[in-house]
Amino acid sequence: MISKNLLKQLLELQTKKGRKLKDKFLLEGARLCQEAIESDWLVEQIFYSQSFQDSENGRKILNLARQKKIGMLLVQEKVITKIAETETPQGIVALVQKKNFSLKDVLAKSPNIILALDNIKDPGNLGTMLRTADAAGVQTVLLSQGSVELYNSKVVRTTMGSLFHLNPVHNLNFSQVIPELKNLGYRIVATSPQSGKRIDQIDFSGKICLLIGNEAFGLSEEILKLSDLKITLPVFGKAESLNVAVACGIILYQIALQKNKESNF
């Protein structure tokens, strides 16, 4: 049985304001909850339905939670429906504490590749780029001020669990961060729809920061001026341009393939 007070607190986490105040967020679905449980992120509590507990995968995930001594509460299906944001919830929701990574800490690890996302607005695009970064072996992702909230429920769902493998730092002022990265030896590679070099003609050796801009407007002139190199993906067909998440994936993998020839990163 869930108390009215706890239910109210959980519903508040469906809002950006609530997540900011509590420094927590909700996670739903079997795969995402399992990824969170197996990670080093703090899962405070699991809420699950009887039908989830009765399923083979449900029993496996709940056993993992027990092994980690995570609090669990059996609730009615209607409670899951209320606190979940998808139309057909899978019977499990996790209460997770945010991880607030600092720029200083992630840069201290001297990552070989950094993905810097400036003013990305669409939750689906951000989630896809985070998942792609994880797949390409990139752990450090920087998000500028004005970007969609990192813990937006659609962002989290779209990462398919990759959020828990990354070191994301958000709400950054790139005008200040980029000079700092340059001082640390990073080459700033900026995407530009025009006048950039083709990615298949570039040597991506050394420490790289890939800078990708807003879906509609790209990178500002101010940010472009801070870059060391501008790159462009050619369009061979009649499409006006590529989706920003697709472009990000193509470029990241071009960099990653070169890096994997040098060493494991």
Image (tube, helix red, strand yellow):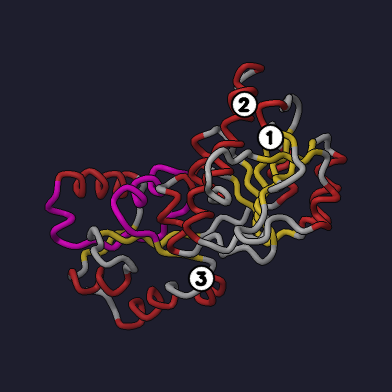
Residue span colored magenta? 27-55
Tell me where residue 7 sits by quadrant.
bottom left
Label 1 sits on residue: 111
Quadrant of image for the N terminus: bottom left
Label 3 sits on residue: 19
Q: Residue at x 66, y 66 (%)?
A: 146
The three-letter amino acid code for the residue at tag 1 is: Pro
Q: 21 or 259: which is nearer to us?
A: 259
Label 2 sits on residue: 265
Q: Secondary structure at mark 2?
A: loop
The three-letter amino acid code for the residue at tag 2 is: Phe
Say which of marks 2 and 3 sits in front. Answer: 2
Residue 162 at x, y percent in the picture: 47, 44
The three-letter amino acid code for the residue at tag 3 is: Arg
Q: CA distance from mark 2 to mark 3?
A: 33 Å
Q: 88 or 204: which is nearer to us?
A: 204
Q: Residue at x 74, y 35 (%)?
A: 197
Label located before the other in sequence (1 or 2): 1
